[in-house]
Amino acid sequence: MLDIITHPVFIWTVCILLFSGLFMMVLTYIVASYMVYTKTLSRVSKDVWSRDIPSSLEPQSVQMYEIGLKWSSDNISFKKDVHIVSEGLNLYGEYYDFGKKTCVIILSGRTESLKYGYFFAAPYASRCNVLVLDPRGHGLSDGKYNTIGFEESKDITNWVKFMHDEYNLDSFIFHGICIGAAGGIYSIIQRKCPYVKAIITEGMFPRFYESMKNNLIEKKKPVFIFIDLIDFWMKHYTKHSMKFGPLDIIDKLDVPLLMLHSKKDLYSRPEFAEKLYEKAGSTIKELVWFDTGKHSMVRINNIEKYDKSINDFLDRIDL
């Protein structure tokens, strides 16, 4: 037996089998990570992330769309279709002009077109004009990749400049959900976006790396090495990394901040929200907790408290 296992042919055979197995495992991880990346952050066709309401939504998400569509229909006479070119991309939105001096820009999360933004407009309509957007790679807008707020921040800044020049507005509020919140933070801090009076966030993550990690864990997918391969694809296609996020710069935030966060958020966990709030540089800042509502679904579960929190906050700041 010893003669067999020490024979060069046997040793080479074992080495080849081990190497082949390791190679196949690595190849599987690489391919699977690419598939997760493209499904999560890449628009593979115009049918993906379109303005059509997805057929696979859970009941509460359907309810959000129904409420939002009714809001839009009720205010159709105030709507104006708007368009800009940002970084070579055609971007589209809808502007509801109620004759106010302040405009709220609804910054939707990943996969969501402007129709998703309708649902979040109601708390503002009595005191602000409303701009809802198709982010790059969503709805009618050009673009293939969701860059988790980095490139989107350039678009947000360009929208503000357009609205200022076209409609003579010099007072804006950002309402960002998840990635939309990150884009708003980057726009204010990194892009020096003018005229922004406050930012209101829901489900803001510290870094997308943590949110992706929590997503993989919830879906019982591998995390070790796998998440770094996803980040590799992110950097390859967009030149940005999931390992940088709002937590790294929020200490430089100099406008009022309201954070709306659910204790049930599995993607941006409560302890993440606490870190962001503690580090935020805003002189006026507030963190409001909600006992119910999953990630990006706080308002549908707490409409009265959600809307009151926004209006109480806006009463405190100079618009």
Image (spheres, grey):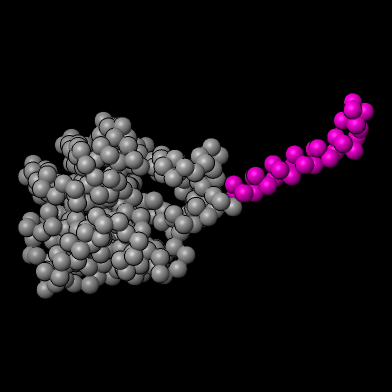
Is residue 15 within the magenta segment? Answer: yes
In the picture, measured across the screen, residue 139 lies left or right of residue 105, that is right
How far across and how far down the image is residue 219, in percent? 44, 45
Foreground residue among 172 and 48: 48
In the picture, measured across the screen, residue 241 lies left or right of residue 102, that is right
Q: What main secondary structure does the magenta stretch of the protein show?
A: helix
Q: Where, by quadrant of the figure, is residue 57 drawn?
A: bottom left
Residue ID at (7%, 56%): 127
Foreground residue among 16 and 246: 16
In the picture, measured across the screen, residue 214 lies left or right of residue 128, that is right
Say if residue 260 shows up in the picture. Answer: yes
Is residue 18 within the magenta segment? Answer: yes
Residue at the extreme top: 2
How far across and how far down the image is residue 196, in percent? 20, 50
Foreground residue among 319 and 194: 319
How far across and how far down the image is residue 97, in percent? 12, 66
Foreground residue among 310 and 262: 262
Residue at the extreme front: 1
The N terminus sits in image quarter: top right
Q: Which residues are magenta?
A: 1-30
Residue ID at (62%, 49%): 28
